[in-house]
Amino acid sequence: MKTLQDLTKTSDDEAVGSTRRPTNPIRRFWSSAVGKKWVMAVSGLALLGFVLVHMVGNLKIFLGAVHLDEYAEWLHTLGEPALPRTVVLWGMRLGLIAAFGLHIVAAAQLTRMNHKARPVRYQSRRDYVAANFASRTMRWTGVIIALFLLFHLADLSWGTTNPDFVRGNTYDNVIASFERVPVAILYILANIALAIHIFHGSWSMFQSLGWNNPRWNPIRRYFAVTFAAVIAVGNISMPLLVVTGVVGK
Amino acid sequence: MDLNLKVWRQAGPDAVGRFEIYPMHDVSEDMSFLELFDVLNEQLETRGEEPVAFDHDCREGICGSCAMMIDGRAHGPERGTATCQLHLRKLTDRETITVEPWRAAGFPIIKDLAVDRSALDRIVEAGGYITAPTGAARDANEILVAKQASDAAMDAAACIGCGACVAACPNGAGQLFTAAKYSHLSLLPQGQPERFTRVVSMVEEMERWFGSCTNHGECEAACPKEISVNFIAMLNRDYVKAQFKNPALSGQRH
Ligand code: HEM
Ligand code: FES
């Protein structure tokens, strides 16, 4: 039988998190779960900024083809003439890819760590008091967002899933895509998942970044609710109004 | 009152455990939850059965020994109390009460409901102290501390180390315990010299044993001392700050 001493010793491969800490300061920070959560929060913040700007830009669909196409073209010319065409756009794209990459890798590694931290689950039903649906489904809403993102790129950037796709005709491409009922439903569901993810994420990031001040703390919840609601309403309005025929050709 | 106690029985660390149901007849509503177990254990011993192993000591909410998952909640349904302070009158609506041990990699089961929580001691050993000079204690009023700061430090110091935060956390994270043990020192002048080495060593030790924090807030809700997750934010903030501190300059004030 194991003695108490045996129990209190853990060999390194039994440990939940990192035990051998690298000396390189960046790798050491990354080896820590608190460090990874900081990276998640910073990359999450960048993604929040992207999601908001992306939505604001796309809402020009309601101003008509001329405005949306003009905006899409402007994104390509951003930085001209100081920089060649699409350089700034590609810079932003690379930043986004990095943010997504770090966010997802950190999420995967932390999830693994959390599973190791409770190898035997509770055998009776848990009664959660504070954890909510959003906080408990982060990894699932996250995976939905990632899969949807691939479809979204194939649909409106590369045109692979959109038979009527014409490069550069942003407005027509969007309308042609959203007029398909299953596609519109997919967009709506994915954005519900995104809003749920944001509802927890844009509150949680304050804690991970250590932005905590009793005076401002109540505002953090309002911020999260508002952000999630704005993104949900704005993003869902587009497929919804197109598929119902309110907006279109 | 009558109720059924459904209790996790496990003969030893590596034994296979299972729930056992014990009908309890005519127990007083004014009993504490631990007294219910005393009654049960007396009955078991009378019948020549093995009593249920569970941790307890002070029975007044200050030692942090009692640790039970009661109907899916650490320390049961009452807020701000430890298992020893839970009374049956709060549970009159229940026919069956299910009790199981804390479950976490860092808390291996010893027997029945008793788990080994020495991982918490490892975290304190890693930095949850100040290196004080020996000799006579300095006068308490020699170092000025703002009331709000000392209040906050006291709130953190209320931690009794019961492990409910880990038990309640869906990730099995030890963040609230570590944050409390970190903050009660690091919010006060005496804790400053070692503040940034403390945060790194305590966080790194914590991560050997426990999961990572997703800010669910279950820990705060389960904590018998209602310690706030605000301390977790402070811990996170100082951990990041520590990355950019040059320890050689830590003696400088400005
Ligand atoms: C536009 C897309 C996304 C946005 C705006 C976003 C935003 C955020 C934010 C702000 C957080 C909070 C970070 C923190 O607590 O410090 C977060 C957490 C999280 N994200 Fe995302 N995220 C996005 C995409 C994804 C994707 C694609 C995945 C995974 C495949 C993912 C998985 C997660 C998980 C699992 C968490 C919780 C991590 C934890 O608390 O341990 N997210 N997200
Ligand atoms: S027995 Fe001491 S806190 Fe419950």
Image (cartoon, rainbow, N blue to C red):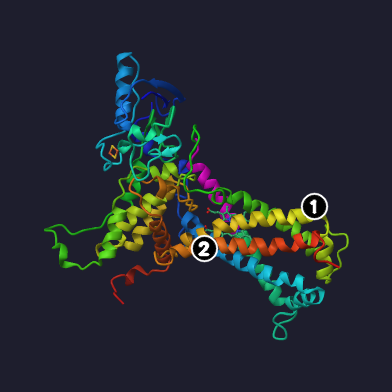
Circle 1 residues within 10 Å: few <14, some 14–19, many ≥20: few
- Judging from the image, what secondary structure is the residue with disc 2 in? helix
Near-viewer residue (A97 or A7):
A97
State yes or no: residue A109 in magenta. yes
Q: Which residue is mark 2?
A: A222
Label at residue B149:
none
For the residues tagged 2 and 1, is the chain the same?
yes
Q: Is residue A190 above or below residue B245?
A: above
> Can the viewer see residue A32?
no
Q: Which residue is mark 1?
A: A182
Q: Quadrant of residue A149?
A: bottom right
What residue is drawn where x is 30% and y is 23%? B39
Which is the main secondary structure of the residues drawn in magenta? helix
State yes or no: residue B167 in magenta. no
The three-letter code of the residue at mark 1 reads: Pro
Name, please, the residue furthest toward the left. B136
> Can the viewer see residue A183?
yes
Quadrant for the N terminus of chain B in the image:
top left
Q: Is residue A206 above or below residue A83?
A: above
Near-viewer residue (A143 or A232):
A232
The residue segment tinted magenta is A103-121
- Pinpoint residue A204: horizontal percent, then vertical percent: 51, 58
